[in-house]
Amino acid sequence: MFNTDNSNGNEGTAMSLSERKALHLTGRLPSVVEDINTQKKRVLQYLRSKPSMLEKYILMARLRTTHMRLFYKIVIEELQELAPIIYTPTVGTACMEYSNIYPFLTPPGVPDGLFLSGTDDFETLCDTIRSYDPSSAFSPEIAVISDGSRILGLGDLGVGGMGIPIGKLQLYVAGAGIDPRRTLPVIVDLGTNNERLRTDPYYLGQRKARPADKEFYESVDRVLKALKTVYPNLLIQFEDWSSEHAFGLLEKYQNQLLCFNDDIQGTGAVILSGMINAIALAHTESGVSPDSHRIIFYGAGSAAIGVARQIQSYFQIDCGMTEEEARRLFWIVDSKGLVTSDRGDKLPQHKVYYARNDNNGKQYKNLMDIVNYIQPTALIGLSSTSGAFTTDVLKRMAELNARPIVFPLSNPATKAECTFADAMQATDNRVIFASGTAFPAYTIAETQKTMVPAQGNNMYIFPGLGLGAVLAQPKTISDVMIYKAAKALADSLSPQERKQGLLYPELDRIRDVSAIVAEAVCREAIDQGTASSDIQNAFNKGHLLGYIEERMWSPESKLIKNKI
Ligand SMILES: NC(=O)C1=CN([C@@H]2O[C@H](COP(=O)(O)OP(=O)(O)OC[C@H]3O[C@@H](n4cnc5c(N)ncnc54)[C@H](OP(=O)(O)O)[C@@H]3O)[C@@H](O)[C@H]2O)C=CC1
Ligand SMILES: CC(=O)C(=O)O
Ligand SMILES: [Mg+2]
């Protein structure tokens, strides 16, 4: 983020009288000297008095740039309450409203993030990157970069997508202790294909259509080269690029740069982790063996294919299936229906591998027909179509399975394929459930037992994955690293969480969990012989996890104090 001393050193009313005097600040603050806990209580009280989630988002955005330490103390200590404000679902609203709320997000002169133009030449880009935060003594370690073309399930929001890199980086800090002064949110402005935005008088980005592929890939390549030239050790996280380009970018750069695509790989890893625990539950509670699963993906974009690939790896590596045996357990559905190789349309490359050819020439369009035909054990939604898992579909899942697995993973909540309450009611409370955005808890009327739904969101993976990569500094992030990160997350459930049938650890343990995920990434880098000497030494001393934890930034970490 932006690293002015004003934001990270500011303690406001918590500054002692002697410090105020030494810094010539006496008179610029009211006379009270209070501690950060009082400051936190005041902010929370005011925040809670605001009925609108967007207003809360704006207040927190402002606090981040005026009082960074307080901001992160609140986010870390109250993550359950704050995640829906700074991340999904509210970040989706903030991105849609970006042009309207922009003037209120940061104080004058403080940028919201780094906006790079797709048309600038290499030298101009390098200068822009260097001059983004000239006062900072800290080089960024992680950049989250988007072109705003597929923001959550909300479509092309152009530069309005800036909220996403910012939201993700806030979770890096809160969830994995990345130093906030070493984070860099980036939007590459290549125009937008959203006609409504191009004609909106307040739209803040370039009012032109996105370029064709040749220009697109050249522009992104220039931007990435500029970022890596200015900051050679930077980890780059691709976020919310349309599937049309997400796969191409990952393929091009994954063996070239220290980078990953969060929507393909992060989502793949987090949902694999939840599925490992769901598969175990279905096995112990209803005798379903891993090889008898039949999984429908409703949606066939970057997220769905990323998740299918990861679960397939699990079937092959951990369950001993051949590639073909594993592949046959997946059916993918897109906007035209079940994806088959004889459907008559030209499939984009990422769908070809999972296209079915055992449909005897019959095509299926409607989800209910598809469910009846396949008789799935699991239904995974990554289609951004609200309500697609109808009561009838959910009831059918409950007829077919003692413990149906239903994961409506699209974001934000308004795009989810069903709600937790829908899924519980239609399945006699037997559903094994996870959603992309947290749904409210559900109380079973008969027993008065309150059930808290799992949140299958890549926020459980990318912070730890990024922390591990930043510390170990491997040349690239390998598929095995991602896989090991997913396994580590699945294994991180405490005995109590396992007993409760949870799929993911409690959110308030996210720092511990991220350290475990980071450790798995570092161990893999060590095995591959690509780990930094610090990580190798910590491992040799039997102190790897402790070393990782010690490296995590917290609001109590030392800060420079010289301004308000
Ligand atoms: N929980 C999490 O951590 C994450 C959740 N997501 C969510 O996943 C969703 C999808 O992301 P992504 O894959 O990148 O997006 P895409 O837009 O690339 O993919 C959407 C897919 O859904 C399909 N689809 C659209 N409408 C329908 C319909 N009526 N019936 C069936 N399929 C339909 C599309 O079909 P077609 O190919 O024919 O256009 C496409 O395959 C988003 O909502 C995103 O927020 C993403 C990453 C992480
Ligand atoms: C969570 C996330 O990365 C998405 O919905 O795109
Ligand atoms: Mg995303």
Image (spheres, rainbow, N blue to C red):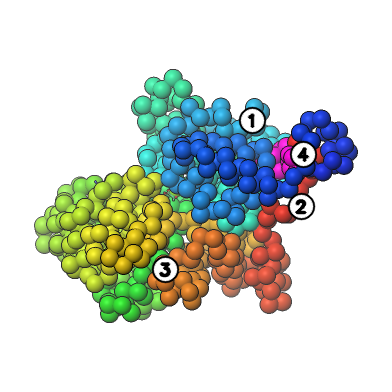
Question: What is the count of numbered marks?
Answer: 4
- What residue is pinned by disc 3? 502
Q: In the rendered structure, which disc, 1 or 2, sits on the residue that comes first in sequence? A: 1
- What residue is pinned by disc 2? 558
Q: Secondary structure at mark 3?
A: loop
Q: Report, in whole angstroms, how far the alpha carbon at label 1 lies from the one at label 4.
A: 24 Å
Q: Report, in whole angstroms, how far the alpha carbon at label 2 lies from the one at label 3.
A: 36 Å
> What are the residue bounds of the magenta stretch?
1-14
Q: Secondary structure at mark 2?
A: loop
**In-image side of 344 versus 266 (left or right):** left
Q: Report, in whole angstroms, how far the alpha carbon at label 1 lies from the one at label 2.
A: 24 Å
Is residue 10 on the magenta stretch?
Answer: yes
Instruction: Name the mark nearer the viewer: 2 or 4.
Output: 4
Q: Residue at x 20, y 55 (%)?
A: 391
Mark 2 touches mark 3? (CB < 8 Å): no
Q: In the rendered structure, which disc, 4 or 3, sits on the residue that comes first in sequence? A: 4
